[in-house]
Image: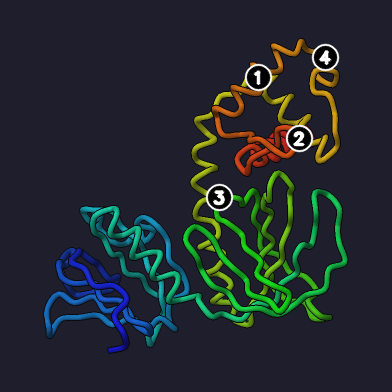
């Protein structure tokens, strides 16, 4: 087997297996394969080149729930597409999932347009080639002009579209993210549709978690109005007390509440939206414009 990247005891279940229920054994991840071994003679080997999705939780409805924190690996076998669910302690699965994504994606060639947009302004930035590397909590695209880093926690919107890349229509990931209070949009394409899908799943991780947390968030009308004002102001120097028509002490209290909720942070001269705050504004604008 190739160099071992992860090796730990856990439980696993494979769709279509003749085994009655989940098995206990070892989960061994190498540079080119994932092995689920109940024993020396009872094992399932999954080539990483056959994996097309990795998802937290048990997304394979046909498989029984497994004790522990699960992750689903979808892959192609000789005849069809199928899934395996691996489960262990939460911390172990968290590390395993990160290492698995790195094994699948590190070194992938990408074609990048960065930035494609700054705020609402569309730029005519040329596409350039680069190599993808997953770092702790984000991705780095190494290009001849220097690295482009997108922390997962900075992502505020995400989509997959077809765009013209060097004169050819290709599927691309459209990633909107924050950089020190400024909203940027980056387009990324890969030669492999499989790799593009896996990259999309990796980038969505924190974004989906933030969306779930926002469902529990309660905002007052003045707080929402203040967020929208900060968004509209952008990098312009404006007086929030004048625009909001509120007393300085009231504005200060609102800003403190928004900071406590993780929606704004200190900028160079004024508060700026965090990625979480930008998502709230995006949702607010969608409601207003619908």
Q: CA distance from mark 1 to mark 2?
A: 18 Å
Residue that numbered label 4 is attached to? 245
Earlier sequence position, callout 2 versus callout 4: 4
Depth order, front residue of 126/198: 126
Depth order, front residue of 19/128: 128
Q: How is the image coloured?
A: rainbow
Tag 4–tag 3 contact (CB < 8 Å): no
**Quarter of the image with the N terminus in it:** bottom left
Look at discs 1 and 2 and give the one toward the viewer.
2
Look at discs 2 and 3 and give the one toward the viewer.
2
**Quarter of the image with the C terminus in it:** top right
Residue 146, percent across and down? Answer: 69, 72
Q: Secondary structure at mark 1?
A: helix
Q: CA distance from mark 4 to mark 3?
A: 33 Å
The residue depicted at 39 percent of the width and 71 percent of the height is: 100
Look at discs 2 and 4 and give the one toward the viewer.
2
Residue that numbered label 3 is attached to? 153
Identify the mark at residue 254; answer none if there is no mark: 1
Considering only vertical position in the picture, is 135 above or below 30? Answer: above
Residue that numbered label 2 is attached to? 269
Considering only vertical position in the picture, is 245 above or below 133? Answer: above
Identify the mark at residue 171; answer none if there is no mark: none
């Amino acid at each position: 087997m190739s160099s071992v990247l992860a090796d730990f005891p856990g439980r696993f279940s494979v769709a279509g297996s003749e085994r009655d229920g989940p098995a206990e054994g070892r989960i061994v991840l190498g540079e080119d394969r994932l092995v689920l071994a109940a024993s020396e003679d009872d094992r399932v080997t999954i080539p990483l080149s056959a994996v097309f999705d990795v998802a937290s939780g048990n997304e394979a409805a046909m498989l029984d729930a497994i004790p522990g924190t699960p992750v689903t690996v979808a892959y192609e076998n000789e005849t069809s597409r199928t899934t395996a669910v691996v489960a262990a302690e939460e911390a172990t699965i968290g590390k395993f999932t990160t290492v698995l994504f790195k094994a699948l994606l590190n070194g992938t060639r990408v074609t990048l347009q960065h930035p494609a947009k700054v705020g609402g302004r569309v730029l005519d930035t040329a596409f350039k080639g680069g190599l993808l590397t997953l770092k702790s909590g984000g991705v780095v695209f190494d290009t001849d002009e220097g690295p482009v880093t997108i922390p997962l926690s900075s992502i505020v919107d995400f989509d997959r579209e077809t765009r013209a890349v060097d004169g050819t229509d290709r599927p691309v990931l459209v990633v909107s993210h924050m950089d020190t209070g400024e909203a940027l949009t980056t387009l990324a394409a890969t030669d492999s549709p499989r790799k593009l899908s896996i990259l999309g799943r990796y980038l969505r991780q924190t974004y989906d978690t933030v969306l779930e947390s926002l469902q529990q968030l309660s905002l007052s009308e003045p707080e929402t109005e203040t967020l929208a004002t900060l968004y509209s102001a952008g990098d312009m120097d404006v007086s929030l007390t004048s625009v909001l028509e509120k007393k300085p002490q009231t504005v200060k209290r609102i800003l403190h509440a928004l900071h406590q909720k993780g929606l704004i942070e200190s900028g160079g001269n004024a508060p700026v939206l965090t990625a979480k705050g930008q998502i709230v504004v995006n949702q607010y604008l969608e409601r207003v414009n619908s």
